[in-house]
Image (cartoon, grey):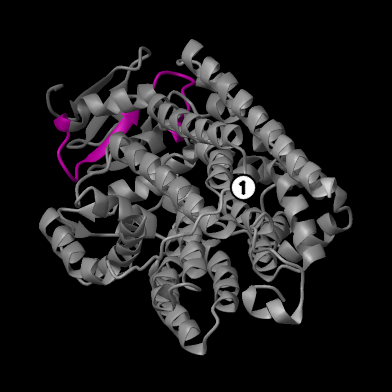
Amino acid sequence: MRAPVNRERLRAAVFLLLLAGLTAVLATRAVRLVRQPEELSSIDESKWFRSSGPVTLAAEAFGSVRSSLPPGGKVWLTLPPAWDPGWWGWMARYHLPEQRIAGVLQQASDAPAGTWVVAIGPDGKAAVQRMGGLPR
Amino acid sequence: MRFLLSLLVLLALLVAVGLPLALLGMPVAPLSVVLLAAVLFPLAGRVRLLPVVLEERWPRPVALLARVALFLAVALFLAKVALAPLWSWDHFAIWGMKSRLMVVKGRLDLSFLALPGFERSVTYYPVGLPMLWRLLALGGLPGTALFKTVHALFGLALVAVTRRGVLRLALSPAMADALAALLAASPLLWDTIAVGLADLPLALFATAGLVLALESNEHPRGIWAAGVCLGFLPWIKQEGLSLALLALVAAAAMVSSGKGRKALLLPAGLLIAGALAIGRMLPKAGPTFFTGDWQGRALERLSRPGEILTMLGSDLIAPGWLGFWFLFAAGLAFALWRRNRTALLLAGVVVLQLGLYAAVYFFTYLPAANHILSSFTRITAALVPLGILMIAVTVSPAETPISPASSTQGDI
């Protein structure tokens, strides 16, 4: 008659052990999150996080010029040397959804007259120019 | 819980009705979104649930620790979503980008998908989720705050719905808390790569559909809502079609009456047909997994399957899963041994969908190793809640071995 009682106790002990393990993992995560809130890349998914690019910089750069561009306007980008034009082109499409992103140029003067150029500086700051017009 | 499931049904209906209407010219603006929601809510509000009679069998310290683990896991999920920036490339190039570009001057306009340069946005992917974000923004431009808030709410809803399913199956609050905590700590919620992507919504509606189907054994008139949730899956992701079909087979097998099966399959069929029809209207730019000599690639990779299978296996036993797939395997073995019908149906959905994912890596145009590294953990994570429901069945007190007398109790 004692066997079923022992089995119940064993089940409870195993369940308790598994729960303690899960709680320990969660507590470890909590400590890391509190100690290094700016270093999320250290938590479990570093390979993705490091390859994602400067997403916050792009959001700030394009966000700062969005209101200076007309809806439907054709927009070219210029970037500092060696910055990835493909990545920044996609970021421009995402952050400037009301404009048509025409592409990335070596220099603003290559843009056709009447179009708009968003020039990203080496510090990540963006400036808007209307070709054939005055800088805004 | 009934209100939460009603809301999920409402969201599915809102997209499935709103997107075709918007294609026909309905404005995507606050008034039209609110009006449409108001029209659909009486239907969505007809979700019915019966109370669960609980049979707690675990000692109090176990129940207490399970509750602590659940609260801690959920709090960590919310904290991490709040802290992490939106950063997934697929969000910027595909899911979030489409949502931000798809409405022009208050009207749905998908013509940008045909523009040069958008091939890399996988133009033929379903647009139901981008539309859902847009509707939740009342037609306005969705931004970081909305994407992250919706992700957090969907995560909470998934934990709650899964917990309800476990409660229904295992009848134990401690087990429900423990398994919900495991879900909240799993890569599906913990990894912020999923923020602003479609994997969490896919998991949410699949789980809601199956939980509603399980509930319908007690309340047969509620099965139509399961059909809506499962039929909505192909609106969310491409692989939602196979997941919907597998889950519908499982749900139909759980339903005892032919009338119930009709009530399940009719709304599901309508929604699936709608998703396929809208999918045919989308431009087919860019490569698909079948691009090029896919048969040649498959033969070449099948000649040495160990490479791909080892990578997949290594992923499933990685520490980040917290042992989930070991638990799943143990539950599956137990279900096979006891021939538990409900557990085997749920396990079948997970295993067959996993098999489909594995098969894709054998013929994809991408280098298999790169493709696995960039997607397998994320897409597999969406199956965790379904696996948790299967585990819950195996620990259910009603779980009994096969016998003619118990054949109506859910066993073969």
Horizontal side of residue B369 vs B32, given as left or right? right
Looking at the image, which residue is at 50% across and 52% down? Answer: B162
Horizontal side of residue B257 vs B223, given as left or right? right
Q: Is residue B252 visible?
A: yes
Residue closer to the observer: B283 or B85: B85
Near mark 1 (Cα within 10 A), the count class, few <14, some 14-19 or many ≥20, is some
B94 versus B278 height, above or below: above
Asked where in the image residue B350 lies, by quadrant, the reply is bottom right
Residue type, label 1: Arg
Q: Residue B120, image x and y in percent?
A: 48, 49
B267 versus A81 height, above or below: below
For the C terminus of chain B, give its image quadrant. bottom right
Looking at the image, which residue is at 34% across and 43% down? Answer: B150
Most extreme residue toward the right is B303
Per the image, label 1 sits on a secondary structure element best described as loop
Magenta stretch, residue numbers: A67-87
Looking at the image, which residue is at 70% across and 39% down? Answer: A12
Q: Residue B51, image x and y in percent?
A: 41, 61
For the N terminus of chain B, give its image quadrant. bottom left
Horizontal side of residue B179 vs B43, given as left or right? right
